[in-house]
Image (spheres, rainbow, N blue to C red):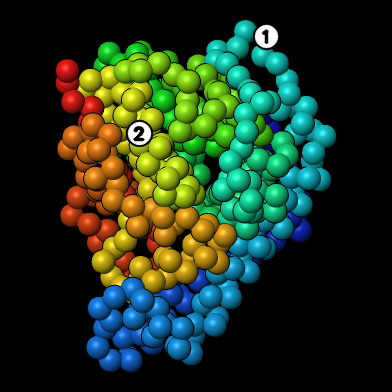
Amino acid sequence: MFDVEDRLTLDERSAVDFVLGLRKRWADTVYPALTREYAATGAPATSIDEAGRTLRELPLYPWFSHLERVQQKMLWKAAGDAVLDRRAELTRQLTAVAVSPAGSLTLDPDLALPDWYTDYDIHIQPGGFCSDDMSAYVYEFGARIVMLRDNDGYKFHQLFTRTALPDLPAATRVVDIGCGFGKSTRPLVARYPTAQVIGLDLAAPGLRLAHAEAEAAGLAIDYRQADGRATDLADASCDVVTGTMVLHEMPAPAIRETIEEAARLLKPGGALRFLEFQLTGDPLRDATVYEHAERNNEPFFHALFGSDLLAICAEAGLTDAGWTPFDERRNGMQPEGWGDRSEWHFPWAVLSATKPEA
């Protein structure tokens, strides 16, 4: 399969590089300057609300907030134009059928997508991730810029797979809930070579792309269109249930239902691992995380932060539930915390829990 980025014209490459540069300077220059303005106001805030009120009065705040939203819109414009100009060729490679497929693709045209999933253009991506086959390509392209090109080759997901998931040499089934276009699912094949690897998602376009790329790489992955709250998989049939950047896009009831479904799927001794976000305890940084969600059309961040996931895990019959900070740059799981980072960054954290032995 060809990569859109390998075919960019000079003008397209320039547009992408401009957005990437703008995003980097927003994170490593504008945000630190904002924190210095904040520090100069006097005693630090003791709550997120208090920090937010001070934040919005800072002289640099209009630039900080505007740049965050406008760069996201520019990102989708650049990615969308590059993809749609190559629609015919991309469609052909998406629909090509492997002679001897390693994995499988199962779509459910009757699956009812929940309103909370379809009513928002999540990440400000026009039409969202589920509207059209090209939307998956657009999201794949755009996600590289969102991660500041630090996740090329999906280093981020490799770190999660290597540092957060348990060693299970005899695993027979691993499930990835909310697999998107497959970036979080593909590393599971090497991590658990004895297991059936299943990727689940609501969006048919993402699953088509995930399947096509897995087949091109010779990876045996079974992709299925399904709701992570009701997967139709058997009780106690999975050694590991994972999810990457999925819970924060759900309202609180759906978060609970997804954890309950994961607990149902796990074998005794099985492991739950979700890579998500957690508040850092720094009121200013956490205020900007809340505002990021609002400017990025992600209305359920508040639901994630307002849900007691550790209690939900316990109520679902899981033990040893806990959150561990995650350093996406190089270390992965980092129990000592996120460290002293001056730039704006996502507060990644891993939710871990275990299904008790019978």
Residue 324 spot, x, y in % from top left: 24, 48
Q: Which mark is residue 99?
A: 1
Which residue is at the front of the view, 201 or 6?
A: 201
Picture coordinates of residue 159, whole percent (x, y): 35, 40
| Dot 1: element | loop
Q: Earlier in the sequence, mark 2 or mark 1?
A: 1
Spot occupied by residue 82 in the image (x, y as percentages of width and height):
74, 49
Q: In this orientation, which residue lies closer to the viewer: 277 or 329?
A: 277
Residue 103 position (above or below residue 289):
above
Three-letter residue code for mark 2 = Glu
Query: In the image, is residue 337 above or below residue 151?
Result: below
Where does residue 309 sit, x and y in percent of width and height? 29, 46
At x 58% / y 55%, what residue is drawn? 123
Can residue 340 be seen from the camera position used here?
no
Q: Residue at x 51, y 58 (%)?
A: 299
Q: Secondary structure at mark 2?
A: helix
Query: Does residue 332 sit above or below 172 in this rendering?
Result: below
Type of amino acid under label 1: Val
Which image quadrant is residue 181 in?
A: top right
Say few, some or many: other residues with alpha carbon within 10 Å of mark 1 (under 14 / 14 to 19 / 20 or more).
few
Q: In whole angstroms, how far apart are the C-alphas of marks 2 and 1?
A: 38 Å
Query: Which residue is disc 2 drawn over?
Result: 260
Residue at 35%, 18% (x, y): give it: 235
Q: Quadrant of residue 156?
A: top left
Q: Quadrant of the N terminus?
A: top right
